[in-house]
Amino acid sequence: MPWQTHTVFNQPLPLNNSNLFLSDTALREAIVREGAGWDSDLLASLGQQLGTAESLELGRLANHNPPELLRYDQTGARLDDVRFHPAWHILMQGLCANRTHNLPWQAEARSGSFVARSARFMLHAQVEAGTLCPVTMTFAATPLLQQSLPALFTQWLSPLLSDRYDPHVLPGSEKRGLLIGMGMTEKQGGSDVLSNTTRAEPLNDGSWRLVGHKWFFSVPQSDAHLVLAQAKGGLSCFFVPRFLPDGQRNAIRLERLKDKLGNRSNASSEAEFFDAAGWLIGEEGEGVRQILKMGGLTRFDCALASHAMMRRALSVALYHAYQRQVFGKRLVDQPIMRQVLSRMALQLEGQTAFMFRLARAWDHRHSAEEALWARLFTPAAKFTLCKAGIPFVAEAMEVLGGTGYCEESELPRLYREMPVNSIWEGSGNIMCLDVLRVLAKQAGVQAILEQEYAAVKGQDRHFDRAWRQLQQRLRRPQEAQGRDITQQLCLLATGAQLLQHASPPIAQAWYQMMLDTRGGVLLSEALQNDLLLRATGGTI
C-alpha cells in the first residue's frame, strides 16, 4: 500500500523459547536441598522443552478448543464420550511420559522422588493447567488402589504405573495407560459429602449397584472413578469403572459438561448412575476416610499449581518490563515498578522454599513427624497460596497494562485458572477447619512446631513476635479465627525456611514485607538486583 499510518516499535516480544527450570534459581536450589538433585538434568531438559513457543501454543489451543460431549453416535446409540482437541492429547502424553501421575509410587522410586515429581508438575503447570486435573486425581488414587484395588481389576496396576497415555475408549485391562477420576459432590451437599444421596446396594457377585447422581464428576473420560455413595453401613467409597469386566459399558450417563470460568481445556461433567456397578474400597462407612487419603495429595497439587502459575505470571511480567521503554527508561528501571517486581519475586522465593519443604515431608511420609507436618501444612498451603494467586496474577497484568488484559497474552487464562484451585478439593473455609481439626486432635503438633521453629528462634524479631502471638491463639483456637491461624502458620513455616536457607538480606526483607504491621518496607537497590537476577536465572 502506498501509505502508512504508523511504525510499530517498543512492543515487547512474548516470552517463549525460555528454559522454565534454569531461569528459576529458587526452584533449582530447592530440589537439591530437599533431596532431588539427581533429577536436575531431566528437569533442565524438560524446562527447555516446555518453554518453547510450540509447547505454549499447545496450551493455548487446548483452552481455545474446549472438550465436547458426545452423548450419541450417528445411529442414536448412547456414547457418553468426550472429544478433545489434539493439543490436549499431546499435553497429556508429555505429563504421563514424565510420570507426573505416578513417579513416587514406582517400586524402584528413589529417595526424593516426591520432590522431583513436584518440580516436574510445576514446570508443566506453567504451560497448561487443565491437563493437571486428571494427572492429580490419578496420582492421588494410585497408592489407595495399590492397597485396595478389587481382585477383578488387579491387572490394572501395570498400566496404572506405566509412563503411557492411552486415550482409547477400551476396557482398562486392554490399555497401556490409565486415568482415575473422582465423583464426590452432589447438588445438595457440596463439601458436605455426608449429605450425599447416591445409594449403593450389594449384589451376590461381590459388586454393588449404584443409583444417584454427581453434580461434579471430574474427568469423565477416566477409566474409573472413586465414588462416594450411601451404603447400609454409612457413606462408603466405590471403585466404578467405565467398562465392566465383561467389556460392557457401565451404566453411567453424562448429562452435560460444566461451562466454567477457567480450566476450559478440562472436562468436568454432571453424571447419573442408572444401576451402575461399583466395587467397595475398604469397609462400609469408611468412605470419607478413604477419600481423605487422596485429599491431602490433591490439595498439595492445588497449592503447587497456583504457585507455578504465579511463577509464570511473574516471568511474563519481567520479560515485558525488561523490554518496554517508558518515559525514557526501561520499565524495569523505573523505581516504583522495580519495587513491585522485586516484591513479587520475594514472595515467590518464600513460596518455593515452603512448598518444597512440604514436598520433602510427603517424601518422608513414613516418618510419623513428617507425616504430621504434611497433614498440618498441606491444607494450610492450599488455603494461603491459592488465595494469593488471584491478586498476584492481577498485579502481573498491570505490569503489561492493556496488553496483559487481552487474550493474546497468557495472563487472562492464568487469571481465570486461579480460582479453581481455591474451590476444588475444599474451599478456603474447609481448609481452615481442617487445620483446626489437626491442631485439636493430632497429638504432637505443638511439639513439631516448637522443634521446627527452635532452629530459627532469635534470628528475626518479626518471627519471634509472630510466633508468640500464634502460641497465644493456639492455646484456645477459635473457629472464627481459623483463617488468621491458618495463614499465620503458613507464614511462619515459610519464614523459618528462609531463615535457614536463604541469604540474610532475602530472609529479613521477606519478614519485613510479610509480617511487619507498620508497612512501608522498601527493598534496597542491591536486594532488588539480587531478587530479579534470581527470578530470571540470569537469562535476561
Image (spheres, rainbow, N blue to C red):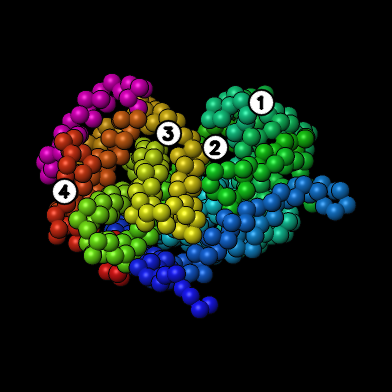
The answer to whether any part of residue 534 appears in the image is no
Mark 4, residue position: 522
Q: Are marks 1 and 2 in contact (CB under 8 Å)?
A: no
The CA distance from mark 1 to mark 3 is: 25 Å
On residue 291, the disc is 2
Q: Secondary structure at mark 3?
A: helix
Q: Which amino acid lies under the numbered mark 3 shown in the image of this protein? A: Gly
The CA distance from mark 4 to mark 3 is: 31 Å
On residue 428, the disc is 3
Indicate yes or no whether the magenta region holds residue 188. Answer: no
Q: Secondary structure at mark 4?
A: loop
Mark 1, residue position: 197
Q: Which amino acid lies under the numbered mark 1 shown in the image of this protein? A: Thr
Question: In terms of sequence position, does the residue under pointer 2 or pointer 4 come before the other?
Answer: 2
- Is 464 positioned to the left or the right of 452 in the image? left
The CA distance from mark 1 to mark 4 is: 55 Å
Question: In terms of sequence position, does the residue under pointer 4 or pointer 3 come before the other?
Answer: 3
Eyeballing the image, is 207 above or below 356?
A: above
Q: What's the magenta region?
A: 458-482
